[in-house]
Amino acid sequence: MTSLIHTSNGKITNKNTSKNDSKNQRDVILEIKDLVVEYPTDDGVIRAVDHVTLTINEGEVLGLVGESGCGKSTLGFALLNLLKGGYIKEGHINFRIDGRFTDLTKLDATEYQKIRGSKISMIFQASQNVLNPLQTVKDHFLDTLREHGYEDPKEEWKNIITLLKRLEIPESRLDDYPFQFSGGMQQRIVIALALMLNPKLVIADEPTTALDVLVQARILQLLSDLVEELSLTMIFISHDLGVVAEITQRVAIMYAGEIVEIGDTETIFTKPKHPYTVALLKAIPNIKDETKRKLNSIPGSPPDLSKPIIGCRFASRCTHAIETCFKESPKMLIFGVETTGKEHQVRCHMYDPRFTNHFNNEE
Ligand SMILES: Nc1ncnc2c1ncn2[C@@H]1O[C@H](COP(=O)(O)OP(=O)(O)OP(=O)(O)O)[C@@H](O)[C@H]1O
Ligand SMILES: [Mg+2]
């Protein structure tokens, strides 16, 4: 049930959210456990997500970062049961609904339909693929309301208008078709569609990548404000670490289907441990420097996900790699809790006490 209300300062608040639901609350809302997602293809089975374990707290914005093809979108689609041509092979997605955890992997299509949009929703990258060119913008919203069983959604409609205003889409434009809007406006409409039923968790998959820098900045600001105002929990998928630094509290770095490092945003940016994270940070695009606009400055390429991988997935591109890295798969190691109270996890032999001494370049 939507319950957005207007406040005098132009912001919106969520009537259903009690004070206890604030950003500071550290209740787990989503717990992904050992999730494996595969795509069968003519060239073999691609394991796009390989035993991913991840916990997200209520009110948190978690960045999910990694090179193209590392499995970020697949993970997002798996959470919404929107995998095209793929399937969840193993694992659990425990999501808290009304105070109780439900394993989403056990839901059937009809049960999923009910929670998609109303409890978990996704903001897709390419608005042109989401918006129907033959439908007015208003009809997109009405269709979604109908799909969720609202026959006479007067109250909900008011809330949608409030949300659209907040996203700077005037009511007078609702009878227009998507092509009559700029790319930035289309993306804001897509955001409104994702938030209209007041979900708890939003997965934003590269929501601004296709837009120019100024429009991108404005949309990120709006999204960031809405996360705060509506007490949303968000997984923010991006290959752009610069953007992730601005909007997230915690960052998970993904490489070839695995999470290789996860920690609070400041730690990941100032004290990264995994050589892949270090390399990604060195490659942050700099809008002032044309020569550093491209992310791709890490030599080599990720492994073929349709073949069994022995050892560390990053070993062949890692300047620190030792023999063990090519033979043994690194375990996730946990740091930071005792010293900083914030968990920092890294999947790298360099930090494993069994092998640390074997590395020349300890960091
Ligand atoms: N429908 C599909 N059929 C077969 N393989 C797929 C399919 N979708 C994705 N893959 C493969 O799964 C792997 C992960 O892809 P995914 O799209 O999740 O990566 P990503 O991290 O989101 O990349 P990008 O940054 O380019 O969006 C890639 O190897 C990709 O080729
Ligand atoms: Mg993707």
Image: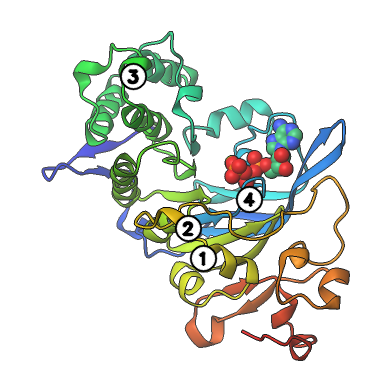
The reply to whether residue 61 is in sight is: no
| Residue 94: mark in rendering | 4
62 shown above or below 355 = above
* Between 99 and 127, the one nearer to me in the picture: 127
- Say whether mark 1 is within 8 Å of ligand 1: no
| Residue 153: mark in rendering | 3
Residue 164 in the image: x percent, y percent? 27, 29
Quick one: SS at disc 3? loop
The residue singled out by tag 1 in the image is 281
**Earlier residue among tags 4 and 1:** 4
Residue 231 in the image: x percent, y percent? 35, 51
Residue at image point 31% right, 15% down: 180
**Earlier residue among tags 2 and 3:** 3
Three-letter code, disc 3 = Pro
| Residue 241: mark in rendering | 2
Three-letter code, disc 4 = Asn
Name the colour scheme: rainbow
263 shown above or below 60 = below
Q: Is residue 211 left or right of residue 35?
A: left
**Earlier residue among tags 4 and 3:** 4
* Between 42 and 120, the one nearer to me in the picture: 42
Which quadrant: the N terminus?
Answer: top left
The reply to whether residue 288 is in sight is: yes
Residue at the far front in the pictured view = 291
